Image (tube, rainbow, N blue to C red):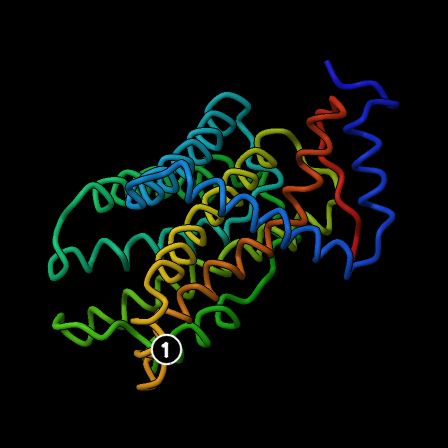
């Protein structure tokens, strides 16, 4: 059941929608600051944020698997985003030989297998339902800048250079891999429940990733400022990457929550 049109929540959403872009950005930043403060006061082991991030991503993938297995359609899904996601996961998994195997690697492997299955279903079993004409983003536009950035800005550690570059590449690409899915949804404007829930899960996932790095830097600001003075830009670039995707997805998450509160099964996004 949705909320009544005159409810406080719908009134709030209507008020936000009437505001200028500058005000919306300010409201989003304010909400993010309060959310970070709440996380900092409630979470003692910040590594749990990474586990939460990957667990929510797993929920999102499970929603896609349910959609493909039961509804027998991949309409509205971007194959480009799924393939880029698999590439990011493969890059991270390949680094485990040098950085060690832990719970994060296990979650990445599980996510990679699930994503590979989604790609297989979209390419071969359900291809007739794939909206290929709406999913035309050239991958090179996203891959090449990430490769260049990774070659110049990567972690400073004792692991081999190739591993450091692969890890940095995965961080940068993960920040923008959702763009083909968002551009596809902008063309259709109407997004069905399962695809919308998957993208919303990505938004929550990115927020937890950004929260981890922002809080860590806040708590050790002097050390990171010292590194910045030496020209070490890896940590700032990670924060920028995590924050970029959070804001990329923030607009969609707003419309998703608005639709859920209103009781709508379809999420409506405005054409840009």
Where is residue 30? Give x, y as percent.
Answer: 64, 51
Q: Quadrant of the C terminus?
A: bottom right
Q: Quadrant of residue 144?
A: bottom left
Q: Name the residue rendered at 27%, 67% in the picture.
A: 166
Q: Name the residue rendered at 31%, 86% in the picture.
A: 230
Where is residue 152? Give x, y as percent.
Answer: 34, 82
Q: Is residue 50 above or below residue 144?
A: above
Q: Is residue 102 above or below residue 256?
A: below
104 left or right of 269 in image: left
| Residue at mark 1 | 233
Q: Quadrant of residue 94?
A: bottom left
Foreground of the two, 71 or 149 = 149
Few, some or many residues within 10 Å of mark 1 (<14, 14–19, 20+): some
Question: How many numbered circles are shown?
Answer: 1
Foreground of the two, 31 or 191 = 31
Q: Name the residue rendered at 41%, 71% in the picture.
A: 236
User: Mark 1 falls on what kind of element?
Assistant: loop
Q: Name the residue rendered at 82%, 45% in the picture.
A: 17
Q: Quadrant of the N terminus?
A: top right
Q: Is residue 221 above or below residue 259?
A: below
217 left or right of 106 in image: right
Where is residue 52? Give x, y as percent.
Answer: 37, 37
Where is residue 121? Give x, y as percent.
Answer: 43, 37
Q: Quadrant of residue 106?
A: top left
Foreground of the two, 35 or 168 = 35
């Amino acid at each position: 059941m949705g909320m009544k049109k005159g409810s406080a929540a719908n009134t709030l959403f209507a008020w936000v929608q009437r505001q200028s872009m500058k005000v919306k950005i300010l409201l989003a930043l304010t909400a993010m600051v309060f959310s970070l403060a709440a996380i900092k006061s409630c979470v003692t082991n910040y590594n749990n944020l990474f586990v939460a991030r990957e667990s929510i991503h797993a929920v999102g993938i499970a929603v896609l698997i349910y959609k493909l297995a039961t509804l027998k359609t991949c309409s509205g899904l971007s194959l480009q985003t799924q393939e880029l996601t698999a590439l990011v996961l493969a890059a991270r998994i390949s680094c485990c030989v040098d950085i060690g195997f832990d719970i994060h690697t296990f979650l990445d492997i599980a996510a990679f297998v699930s994503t590979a299955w989604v790609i297989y279903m979209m390419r071969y079993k359900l291809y007739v339902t794939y909206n290929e004409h709406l999913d035309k983003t050239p991958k090179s536009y996203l891959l090449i800048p990430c490769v260049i950035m990774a070659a110049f800005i990567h972690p400073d550690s004792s692991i081999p250079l190739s591993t450091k570059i692969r890890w940095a590449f995965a961080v940068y690409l993960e920040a923008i891999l959702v763009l083909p899915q968002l551009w596809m949804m902008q063309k259709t404007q109407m997004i069905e429940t399962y695809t919308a829930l998957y993208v919303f899960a990505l938004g929550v996932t990115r927020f937890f990733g950004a929260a981890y790095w922002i809080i860590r830097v806040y708590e050790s600001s002097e050390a990171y400022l010292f590194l910045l003075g030496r020209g070490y830009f890896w940590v700032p670039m990670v924060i920028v990457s995590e924050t970029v995707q959070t804001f990329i997805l923030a607009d969609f998450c707003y419309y998703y929550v608005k639709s859920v509160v209103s009781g709508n099964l379809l999420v409506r996004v405005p054409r840009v």
